[in-house]
């Protein structure tokens, strides 16, 4: 009996001190009536449907589809940074893929109706257009799935024993994808090689599943005419060897968006030529491991065959330490978004000709507004160090120059009248010794990041120049707040 019902019974029944001694002849009558009343109320409570139970199937499916879009739980500080988002990738928002509906493995155990709605063919169009297979998440979910742990957390020993005995079956993954292949439009594969635990240790998963390059190819073959978006992250076991991964991907002619991220291996440009046959491709992202400074990863050149990608509007090539030249044909492609972050040896001569660009990210490319005095540098090195002429990129709405060697706010920014987003953070040599009239002249700007500029040795106090920098940044912040539409300036508070 529920607590609410017990409380109602207790309130309805008179206390012993208030009741007169009953007549022995009629003692059973009031007792029987009270029992019948309590039993009737209990029956009505137990048979009354819950609010969730009476939801129509269409509305319940809508709830499930919205659950699939919810991101992970974040802290208050992370929520603030996510609110102020740039249209390019930044250090503060790494954009790790979220497992989507696979984050809620217990939905099918609530009741048979929910299980049916999750599995029936009619619901697949709404629930499984996007499918995320996170190998780490799938294994952890499998460990926690037993009913015995539905209302309590397993002990450390129970978790270790269960995790040791749990393996992920490639056949089950393929069966799941095969049943939904006609409706799937986006696939995300991540963490096949392992993941970083909350304690900061790397958990190797290469012996916890049998999903190989062969299964990867079979999966793509199922959807070679329908798949539009493929995102692969932390899966170097597919690309570290010349085992045909790029050939398998290039066979999916329907792909419009392709993203391969966090590679810590060198890439063969000969193999990447095959991507040129994907004439429907609109967005391409091939990213080397961002934190890797000890060895060379990624591409060493961009294949000439990519000139045939005439629908490409977004190109992200971050973290290619061997890449040193951008081909001229990039200026002839309809590119509107270009990200070359962490390509530190790249000649950027072609950038001024790419006048159609709307988003440009040159983060951590070693750029400087002007070179420090001293011995002259080789011409090739000097070109790489200098910020390219951006004055003709008048369509730019977002610019990322963070983590470079700029010593001042580039005056050329005043020519970019449509600029809305500007990231100058982590330019540790950047000083502001006069009012920021360049930024004040940008009437369209909405978000500027000036954190981590003018860094000095920790002396316990700010030098006079540092105080001047912070004074003018604070003055800019005050003026921007007075604008009718508002403009957010991100700055250090300490």
Image: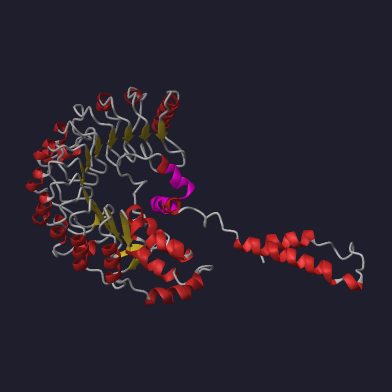
Q: Is residue 471 magenta?
A: no
Give the colouring mode of the picture.
secondary structure
Find residue 230 and report its horizontal and vertical position in percent.
24, 54
- 390 with respect to 197 (left or right): left
Regarding residue 155, the answer to whether it shows in the image is no
Q: Is residue 71 magenta?
A: yes
User: Which residue is pictured at 32% across the width and 68% down the height?
Assistant: 204
Find residue 439 and report its horizontal and vertical position in percent.
34, 26
Instruction: Say if 54 sits above or below 156 in the image.
Output: above
User: Which residue is pictured at 34% across the width and 32% down the height?
Assistant: 431
Helix, strand or loop: magenta stretch: helix
Q: For this rendering, which residue is in front, 324 or 166?
A: 166
Q: Quadrant of the N terminus?
A: bottom right
Find residue 437 and report its horizontal and vertical position in percent.
34, 22
Magenta highlight range: 62-81
Q: For this rendering, which residue is in front, 179 or 68?
A: 179
Instruction: Say if 354 sits above or below 297 in the image.
Output: above
- 135 with respect to 160 (left or right): left
Q: For this rendering, which residue is in front, 437 or 58?
A: 58
Find residue 17 and report its horizontal and vertical position in percent.
90, 64
Regarding residue 66, the answer to whether it shows in the image is yes
Which quadrant of the structure image shows residue 474? Answer: top left
User: Which residue is pictured at 9% across the width and 52% down the height?
Assistant: 273
């Amino acid at each position: 009996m529920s607590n609410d019902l017990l409380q109602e019974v207790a309130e309805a029944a008179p206390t012993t001190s208030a009741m007169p001694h009953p007549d022995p002849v009629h003692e059973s009558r009031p007792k029987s009536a009270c029992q019948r009343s309590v039993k009737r109320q209990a029956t009505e409570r137990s048979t009354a449907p819950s609010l969730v139970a009476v939801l129509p199937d269409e509305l319940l499916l809508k709830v499930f589809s919205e659950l699939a879009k919810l991101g992970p739980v974040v802290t208050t500080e992370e929520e603030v940074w996510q609110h102020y988002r740039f249209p390019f990738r930044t250090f503060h928002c790494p954009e790790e893929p979220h497992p989507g509906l696979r984050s809620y493995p217990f939905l099918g155990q609530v009741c048979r109706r929910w299980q049916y709605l999750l599995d029936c063919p009619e619901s697949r169009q709404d629930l499984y257009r996007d499918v995320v297979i996170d190998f780490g998440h799938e294994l952890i979910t499998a460990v926690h799935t037993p009913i015995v742990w539905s209302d309590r957390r397993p002990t450390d020993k129970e978790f270790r024993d269960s995790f040791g005995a749990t393996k992920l079956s490639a056949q089950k993954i393929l069966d799941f994808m095969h049943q939904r292949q006609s409706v799937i439009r986006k696939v995300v594969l991540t963490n096949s090689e392992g993941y970083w635990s909350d304690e900061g240790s790397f958990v190797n998963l290469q012996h916890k599943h049998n999903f190989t390059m062969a299964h990867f190819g079979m999966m793509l073959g199922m959807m070679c005419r329908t798949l539009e978006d493929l995102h692969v992250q932390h899966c170097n076991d597919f690309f570290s060897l010349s085992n045909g991964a790029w050939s398998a991907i290039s066979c999916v002619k329907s792909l419009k968006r392709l993203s391969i991220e966090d590679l810590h291996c060198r890439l063969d440009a000969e193999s990447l030529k095959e991507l040129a046959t994907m004439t429907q491709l609109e967005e391409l992202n091939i990213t080397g491991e961002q934190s890797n400074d000890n060895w060379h990863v990624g591409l060493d050149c961009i294949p000439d065959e990519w000139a045939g990608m005439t629908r490409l509007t977004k190109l992200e090539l971050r973290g290619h330490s061997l890449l040193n030249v951008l081909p001229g044909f990039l200026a002839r492609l309809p590119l509107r978004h270009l990200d070359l972050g962490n390509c530190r040896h790249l000649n950027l001569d072609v950038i001024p000709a790419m006048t159609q660009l709307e988003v440009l990210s040159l983060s951590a490319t070693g750029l400087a507004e002007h070179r420090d005095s001293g011995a002259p540098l080789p011409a090739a090195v000097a070109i790489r160090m200098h910020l390219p002429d951006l004055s003709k990129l008048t369509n730019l709405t977002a610019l990322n120059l963070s983590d470079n060697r700029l010593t001042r706010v580039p005056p050329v920014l005043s020519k970019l009248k449509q600029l809305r987003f500007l990231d100058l953070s982590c330019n540790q040599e950047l000083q502001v010794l006069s009012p920021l009239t360049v930024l004040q002249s940008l009437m369209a700007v909405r978000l500027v990041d000036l954190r981590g500029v003018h860094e000095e040795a920790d002396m316990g106090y700010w030098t006079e120049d540092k105080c001047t920098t912070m004074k003018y940044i604070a003055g800019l912040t005050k003026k921007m707040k007075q604008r009718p539409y508002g403009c957010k300036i991100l700055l250090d508070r300490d």
